[in-house]
Amino acid sequence: MAKRPAEDVHSENDALKAGERPLSTDSGNEAGPFEDEFEDEFESDDEMLEAGVDGRPDEEREAEEKRDAMDVDQKTFIPGRDKLSAGESLSPDTSTYEMLHNLTTTWPCLSFDIVPDQLGDNRKAYPATVYAVAGTQAESKKAHQNELMIMKLSGLSRMDRGRDDDSDEDDDDEDENADPILETKSIPLPSTTNRIRAHQLSPMNASRPPTTLTATMLDNSDILIHNVTPHLTAFDTPGATINSQQPKPLATLKMHRTEGYALDWSPLIAQGKLLTGDNDGKIFVTTGAEGGKWAPDNRPFTGHQGSVEDIQWSPNERNVFASASGDGTVKVWDVRSKSRKPAVSVKVSDTDVNVISWSRQNTHLLATGADDGQWAVWDLRQWKPSAGGASSSEPKAVASFDFHKEQITSIEWHPTDDSIMAVAAGDNTLTLWDLAVELDDEESKDTAGVQGVPPQLLFVHYMEMVKECHWHPQIPGCVMGTGGGGFGIFKTIS
C-alpha cells in the first residue's frame, strides 16, 4: 500500500478517485460548426508547441504540477510491520483489485457466514450478489439492540478502470458499474454473538429453496438455532412478509455453563449435527431429530486443559472432528468413543491455538493459527494415536509462517484450490497465500526488494480489527471479512 498525508492538496490536474466520473462539458444537444478558439492567438505550429498544451510554457506548467501534486510515498507499506508517521494515512492500490467494497452496520459483527444461493456456481459476471448472516456486538448498555442479521449484498460491481474502448458493451458496462445495495432482515437476540454458522438442508421438492438454519453462540452461553429461510426468500419475493412466529428460535440449547467460541455444523449429516465448545474445555454434540426437534447429548467430550477456541468436523469422515484450545493443542476425536476422550492430541503451539481449518481438497491437511501470530499446516497422517489421548511424539508442520506479528483470528482453505489460504490477524490485515510456491524456486524468491516477506505471500489487504474471513464458495477468488470497522468484500486481479 502507498502512504500519503492525511491532508491532501487537490488541484485540477489530480486524477479522478475510484468511482468518480468526469462531468460532461456538453452545453446542448445540437452540434454546431467546428471553431478553432486559438486560430487568432497562434499563427504557427511552432508557436503552439512552444506555448504548451494550456497556453503556458511546458516548464512553467510542469513546475506548478509538481508543486501542487499530492505527496505520495510509493514504497511498499506492510500493515502490522511498518508504522505511519504523523499526518500519514493508508491508500489502497486499487489497480490490484478486481472488486472492492466496504460497508458498515450499526453495530460491529465479529462473526458471520456466507449462505450458498441458487444463482449458480463458478460465477464470474458482474455485478455480483452475496447472501450472508451475521451476529452483532452491541455495547453492554444497549445489549437489547443485538440482532441476527440476514443480509443480501447486490450490485457489487468490478473496479472502474476508466475503460475508453468504443465497444458495443455499453449496456453491460452500466450493469457492471451498478451501485452496491445492502438489504437486511433482522431477528432480535438477547445477547452479543460470539460465533455464528449457517447450514442448509436439502429440500424435499426440487422446486423449493433449501432450508437455511443458523446456529448462534451467545456470550451468555446459550446457543440459538433459527430457520432463516423465510427471511432469505423475502429478499427476492415481492410482497413477502415475515410472520410473528418465524423470528423465534427453533431451539435454545443450554448445556454449556460458560460462554464459548467453537461452533461447527457437520457437512455430512443432512438433518444437521452441531458441535459446540466452551471456555471450560467441554465439547457437546447436538443432533437434529424428526419433527424439527434438536437433541443435545449432555455427556461432554473432555480432555482440553484450556478453553476450546475452535472446532471443525472432518470433511470426509462423519464421526471425526478436531478441536483447537488455549492449552496449545489440537485434538482429534471420534464421536463414537464411549470414554469421550480424544483419539489424538498434538502440541502445536506454546500459545493459544485460536483457529483451525480442515482442507476439503486434501483431507489429510489441517491448518492452525495461534496467538503468537504463527500459522501452520499439518499432515494428519503423521499424527499417531497414543494411550489416553496424550501425544507420544511431536510431528513437525509441513509449512509454518511467522509473517504476522499479532494473533491469528481466522484461517480458511480456498474451497476449490488446495494450495490457497486466507488468513486474518490482529495486525489489521487479511492475507492470501499460495502454498504451491516452491522455496527453492529462484524466480519465486523475488519479492520486489521487500525484506521479510515469504514468497508464498500473494496479497495483503488492510482491514481494521479484522476478526473473521471466508471465501465465497460460488464466486471464485471472492473473499469477505468482518471486523471492528465493518464488512469488506473483495477479489484480487491475481
Image (spheres, rainbow, N blue to C red):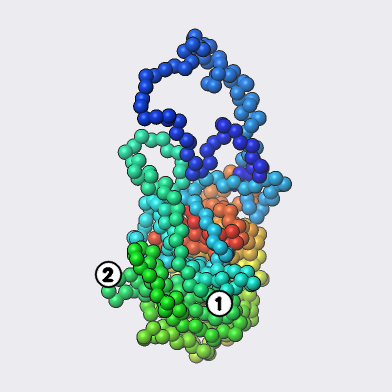
Instruction: Please name the amino acid that badge 2 sits on.
Output: Ser
Residue 302, quarter of picture: bottom right
- Residue 44, given in percent of the width and then of the height, sits at 49, 9
Q: Can residue 384 be seen in this view?
A: no
Q: Residue at x 54, y 81 (%)?
A: 222
Q: Could you say which disc has been placed on residue 207 in the image? A: 2
The alpha-carbon separation of the residues under discs 1 and 2 comes to 35 Å
Give the tally of numbered discs. 2
**Above or below 396: residue 258:** below
Q: Residue at x 66, y 30 (%)?
A: 67
**Above or below 386: residue 94:** above
- Residue 473, given in percent of the width and then of the height, sits at 42, 62
Q: Nearer the viewer, mark 1 or mark 2?
A: 1
Locate residue 468 relative to residue 127 in the image: left or right: right
Q: Residue at x 61, y 67 (%)?
A: 370
Q: Which residue is drawn at 64% across and 25% down?
A: 63
Outermost residue on the right side: it is 86
Q: Give the residue number, with chain letter if any, for mark 1.
A: 190
